[in-house]
Each structure stands twice: as C-alpha cells, then as structure tokens.
Amino acid sequence: MLSKIIIVLFLFIIIGSLFSGLFYLVKDKGTSERTVRALTVRISLSVLLFVLLMIGYATGLLQPHGVTPG
C-alpha cells in the first residue's frame, strides 16, 4: 500500500513540475532558464520513478496483474 502512495505522489509531483514549466514558459516568454530547469526536474523524476518501478518489480514488491477477463 505504501508503494502505491509513493507512486501516486511521484506522479503528482511530476505533473506539478510540468505545469510549473508551462507557467515559466508563458510568464518569461522563454527568455529565462527556469523553464528548462523545471522540465529537467520533471524528466529526472520520471526516470527515477521508472527505475523505482523496475526495482519494485524485480524485488517482488510490486506485482503485475492481469487485465484480461478470464
């Protein structure tokens, strides 16, 4: 259960970083480095989340489930 909460928190932080990048892009008209920094944070968090998901799957903490009926 804790792992699912951590994954959802990561997703909210990634979405927040995406919107902050959009805000800086509109506000600064692309002249400052804040947009690049916000999007770099988003990409870094996305890669970190992907690595954590792979580690969770490899250690058995996260179990895939079937989506097909049957």
Image: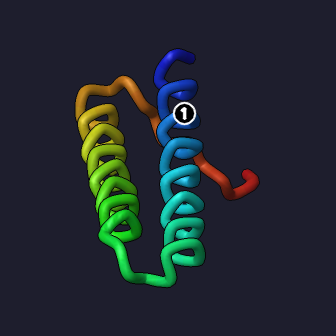
Q: Which residue is mark 1?
A: 9
Q: Residue at x 37, y 63 (%)?
A: 34
Nearer the observer, 32 or 69: 32
Q: Position of residue 23 (x, y in %)?
A: 59, 66
Q: Position of residue 70 (x, y in %)?
A: 73, 51
User: Compared with residue 69, is residue 32 higher up or lower down, i.e. above or below?
Assistant: below
Q: Residue at x 51, y 42 (%)?
A: 13
Q: Position of residue 31 (x, y in %)?
A: 38, 81
In this view, the residue farthest toward the top is 2
In this view, the residue farthest toward the right is 69
Q: Position of residue 52 (x, y in %)?
A: 30, 38
| Amino acid identity at mark 1 | Leu
Position of residue 19 in the picture relative to residue 32 (left or right) = right
Q: Residue at x 54, y 28 (%)?
A: 4
User: Compared with residue 44, is residue 12 higher up or lower down, i.e. above or below?
Assistant: above
Q: Residue at x 42, y 31 (%)?
A: 62
User: Compared with residue 4, is residue 65 higher up or lower down, i.e. above or below?
Assistant: below
Q: Residues within 10 Å of mark 1 (few under 14, many from 20)?
A: few
Nearer the observer, 64 or 29: 29
How many numbered tags mark residues here?
1
Q: Quadrant of residue 22?
A: bottom right
Question: Where's the N terminus, which quadrant?
Answer: top right
Give SS at disc 1.
helix
State the colouring used for the structure image: rainbow
Nearer the observer, 61 or 42: 42
